[in-house]
Amino acid sequence: MPDRMWTRPERPGTHLLDRKPDFTPPPRPFSAIRPRDPVGSGACSELAHLPPPGGNPESGVSPDEDGPGPNDFGTASAKGHVQRSPPSNDRTAVGVTGARAVVAAVFAVLSAACAGGDGFGGPPQVGEPAPPFAAPSLIDGDTVSIASLQGRPLVVNLWATWCPPCREETPYLQSIYDRHRDAGLQMVGITVDGRSAAGAAREFLEQSGATYLQLHDPGMRVLDVFKVIGLPATYVFDSEGIVRFSGNRPVFEGDAEFEGALAAVLEPGS
C-alpha cells in the first residue's frame, strides 16, 4: 500500500480501549466472490435491501443532521495519517455512541458473513456495477446520484482537504477532465470534509482550478458505501455504470492502469 495515503481510523467511542489503529491492511484483502448464504436462507438477500446504520446511501442525507465536525475523526499528520481525537467526557454522548456502535457492529457482522466472512466485502472491483450513492453538490446543494450520471464514462474521486495526497492529485484529475470532457467524460469529486470545513473545501477547489462536479458528504457515508480503507480513492465507470478501474490510492500522471482504463471507456463503442 502506498505510504502517502490516509488510513481510515476507527470512529471515536466504538472501540473498547479507544486505541489508535496500528495495523496496515493489505491492499486487496477481500474476495469479490459471494458464497452461498451463510446466515440462513434468504437472510443475505434481505440484508442487501436494508440501509446501513448510517442511513440510506441514495438519500443524500447524512446520518447526523449537522454531520461530524472537522475533528470528530481525528486530525491528519504530516504523512497524511489521522491521529484520533480524545473521547468525549459527556456520558450521554458516550451512551448514544455506544448504542449506535452496537447496531453498527451487528450489521457489520451480518454483512461480513454474507460477503464470505473476510472483512466488510471490499471496494467495488472491475466488472461490478457502481454502488448506489447520492449527495448534495458542494456548490449549490442540489442532490446528485451516481446512477443519474450513467450513459457516459465517469470518474469518481473520494477526497478531503486534510488528506495531503488528495490535494496533490487534484490538478492532475482536472487536467484529465479538461483533456477528455469534449469526448464525453464526466468527473465527480466527493469530499468527506465536515460541514464547518465546506468553505475551506470550496476555497481549495478554486485555488487549484478544479471545475468538475463536487459533492459533499460530511457524514462520510461514501466510505462505507464504497468500502474503502483510506483516502484518496478513484474509480472509473463505463457508460453502463460498470467499474473499469478501482484504485484505493492516489493517481498521478503516468499511472498506466488508470489511464489505460480511461482510454478503454472513451473509445467509440466501448
Image: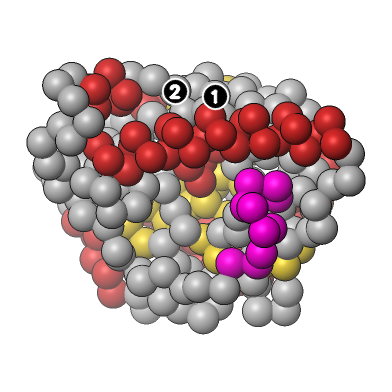
Judge from the rendering whether residue 220 lies leftward or rightward of residue 230; answer left or right. Answer: right
In the figure, is residue 181 to the left or right of 87?
Answer: left
Element carrying mark 2:
loop
Which quadrant would residue 194 be assigned to in this image? top right
Residue 55's label in the rendered image is 1
Q: Are marks 1 and 2 in contact (CB under 8 Å)?
A: yes
Q: Which residues are magenta?
A: 12-21
> Which quadrant is home to the N terminus?
bottom left
Neighbour tally class for label 1: few under 14, some 14-19, many 20 plus, Cα within 10 Å? some
Of residues 29 and 217, the one drawn nearer to the viewer in this rendering: 29
- Is residue 16 part of the magenta span, yes or no? yes
104 or 148: nearer the viewer: 104
Residue identifier under label 2? 51
Which element type, helix, strand or loop, lies under badge 1?
loop
**Horizontal and vertical percent position of residue 60:** 56, 24
Q: Residue at x 70, y 47 (%)?
A: 13
Vertical comparison of 128 with 267: above or below:
above
Tag 2: residue type? Pro
Q: How far apart are labels 1 and 2 at the CA level? A: 6 Å
Please give the name of the residue rendered at 67% of the width and 36% of the height, measured from the top-left corner: 98
Q: Position of residue 137 (x, y in %)?
A: 63, 32
Task: Look at label 1 and name its amino acid.
Answer: Gly
What residue sits 28% from the left and 54% below the top? 118
In this rendering, would 19 be left or right of 92? Answer: left
Drawn side of residue 267 relative to residue 248, left or right: left
